[in-house]
Amino acid sequence: MKLKYLIVLILGIAIYACSDDDDDDKDNHDPVAQALEDDADLVEFLQTHYLTEDKAIDTIMNGETPLYSIVEIDNINYNDIDYKMYYYVDQVGVGVQPSRNDSVQVLYRGFLLDSTKFDENLSYTSKKSWFHLPQTIMGFRYGVSYFKSGERVIYPDESFGYENTGNGVFFMPSGLAYGRNGSSSIPGNAPIYYFFDLGSVVVADADQDLVINNKEDIDGDGDVSNDDTDGDLVPDYLDIDDDNDGTPTRLEDTDEDGDPTNDDTDGDGIPNYLDADS
């Protein structure tokens, strides 16, 4: 039996995804109906609230411009359910735009629609600033990917930060957040939103096999957690031997150019690292 050593890129804490599709029949949970209900709640919130000059969200009282008129909409199909993400771009950023499978350093504040703040990180030196996106809720993965990173700066006291960051707000339904189970600080079936600044992006290779996470998305759906070429229940992005042929992926880079994805010894159109009989 193959002995696997999974070298996982640990970059601080993550906003972990919660499964909301297990045992649906047990409590008659209808994810399609919930998605529609969440969207109605989000639309109502966006129509009745506005973004203040100091970048807070408040209730419209004097004809202020509603959030709904300034947000963009992304239609997302996840687990065969149609969802809508809403996001406002204050600044797009000037650096790298992450895929949903990279690692990022961010500042953020997370809220329920009743304005309850459930989490925040306001410092780039905090361990809470780093996230490995495949380990976060799907809505966070999408939200961050709409922006670009900033420019790193060193201040006179030798501390650091980022300028010209991508920043804004993104709003997500519960099906892309913490689902029907919620979390310790978030009720079940709760739409949520985040203010955030995207400081830095690391193009991630979680298992350090020379194939970046985003190239291990074999089915092209943007989610590396469901790609498992050799069927060993370890997704490729965490599997150092993707085809289970006994040769680690990084050693199947036969032309030694640092990229195993372009090596196909038997010419069958399948790169060696995914081809057990190469």
Image (cartoon, rainbow, N blue to C red):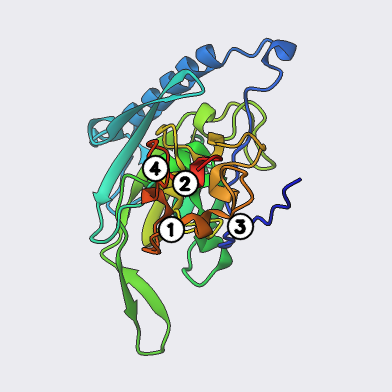
Q: Residue 84 placed where, x, y %?
A: 38, 26
Mark toward the viewer: 1 or 4: 1
Q: Where does label 1 land, which residue?
A: 254
CA gap between label 2 and label 3 equals 23 Å
Q: Nearer the N terminus, badge 4 or badge 3?
A: 3
Could you tell me if the residues under marks 2 and 1 are in contact, i.e. CB atoms within 8 Å? Answer: yes
User: Residue 55: x percent and y percent?
Assistant: 33, 52
Q: Depth check: 96 or 236 in front? A: 236
Q: Residue at x 37, y 47 (%)?
A: 99
* Residue position for label 3: 8
* Earlier sequence position, callout 2 versus callout 3: 3
Q: Are marks 4 and 2 in contact (CB under 8 Å)?
A: no
- The image position of residue 56, as x and y in percent, is 37, 49
Can you say whether 55 is above or below 113 in the image?
below
Please tell me which of labels 1 and 4 falls first in the chain. Answer: 4
- Foreground disc of the pair 1, 3: 1
Q: Which mark is residue 272?
A: 2
Q: Spatial distance from mark 2 to mark 1, Cα to Cα?
A: 9 Å
**Amino acid under label 1?**
Thr
Residue kind at label 2, given as amino acid type? Asn
Residue 95 located left or right of residue 15:
left
> Mark 3 or mark 1, which is nearer the start of the sequence?
3
